[in-house]
Image: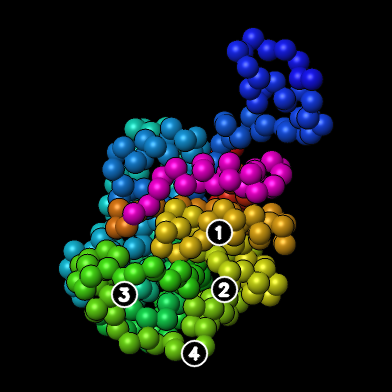
Amino acid sequence: MPTPHATKRPTDAAYLDDRTDTDLVDLPRELLTLPWIDIHNHAHTLSWDDRERYALAGCRSMLMVASGYHWTPYKPVEADDIRFLWDDAINRRTVIERNHFFEAKLGLGVHTGVRIENPDELLDAMDDYCALEEVIAVGETGVVPSQHVSGWSVDEQRAVVQAQMELADDHDLPVILHTPNTSADAKRPYRDGLGVTPGYEKNAGLGADPVLDGENPALESVKIDVAAARDAGLDEERVVASHADRNNTAYLMEETDCYLSYTIGHSWLVGVDAADVADAIDEYGSDRIMIDTDCANVLRTDPFALKRAIFELYRYGIDIDDIRRVVVENPRAVFGFEE
Ligand SMILES: [Zn+2]
């Protein structure tokens, strides 16, 4: 018989005492306050309230990536437009830290998702930017199979990516790779003219013909990036492949020494979530794994995503030590965030 309780009739609580596995349920209280680091977001484009959500959820440090072309006002995109994005992030970083208390550092780079008219101008300027104390990474960058509006040949993209890797190596900075995802199939498409994020550059109807069209162009792009890193003399441990997914995990884990960062802030779009991270930890261990949100104002993203993933990883059976390694220790080791 269950132990008597004060309740009018027995509740679930009355039966707990007899369960043999009661002692096995170990609630991970430390996860409630575990600090975490987001190594890839665009929080400088978010609202004050969204950044405050990072702080409320225990974010200790973040890397705000200023290389997206979505924010450039003029089309086609010129070098100066990208440079404005870098300067804008530098301009606002300090106030973001003072508003929300987490450490906010910067990644600057030339993304190849849209053709840039005169990239050499940017690469020339980048040397001085890389020397800035607040710049702790180069990127995001990486070859992509197709551009918006006007294509950029693979050779030209690769040259831009490799030049940035050489700069990163000169300055002993890690590189954040943008690896293309193989998006999850949408249940149904949006009506014409809207798309994921309407506008000139992201209007799917304006997509340029792919410049890589083999069987698996998303994976092919990553392989070109890794070859570029090797040619640049950049250690693979200094490369963090963001947007890791089921399509590129085996290659990156088994044939390179790169880190893999799983982007879980817009799972509705790319289908990657904490379950993928848990599977990767089970299979390869946690030594080269991170998680990022990629939160940005150009699409629906969740500033709580990383905190939610911490709980979800535990529910999926991942040890607390592995969770801590993935969300705090690996980011600190690679990017040098403060203790
Ligand atoms: Zn991004």
Spatial distance from mark 3 to mark 4, Cα to Cα?
20 Å
Residue found 64% across the figure and 74% down from its top: 251
Indicate which disc residue 247 carries.
2
Going from the N terminus, do you reach mark 4 or mark 1 first? Answer: 4
Spatial distance from mark 3 to mark 2, Cα to Cα?
23 Å
SS for callout 4: loop
Q: Are marks 3 and 4 in contact (CB under 8 Å)?
A: no
Against 155, is 164 above or below? above
User: Which residue is identified by label 1?
Assistant: 261
Q: How many marks?
A: 4
Going from the N terminus, do you reach mark 3 or mark 2 first? Answer: 3
Residue found 43% across the figure and 71% down from its top: 185
Spatial distance from mark 4 to mark 1, Cα to Cα?
25 Å
Q: Nearer the viewer, residue 270 or 176?
A: 270
Residue 106, image x, y percentages: 42, 51
Q: Which residues are magenta?
A: 300-325
Q: Is residue 144 in the magenta section?
A: no
Residue found 44% across the figure and 89% down from its top: 213
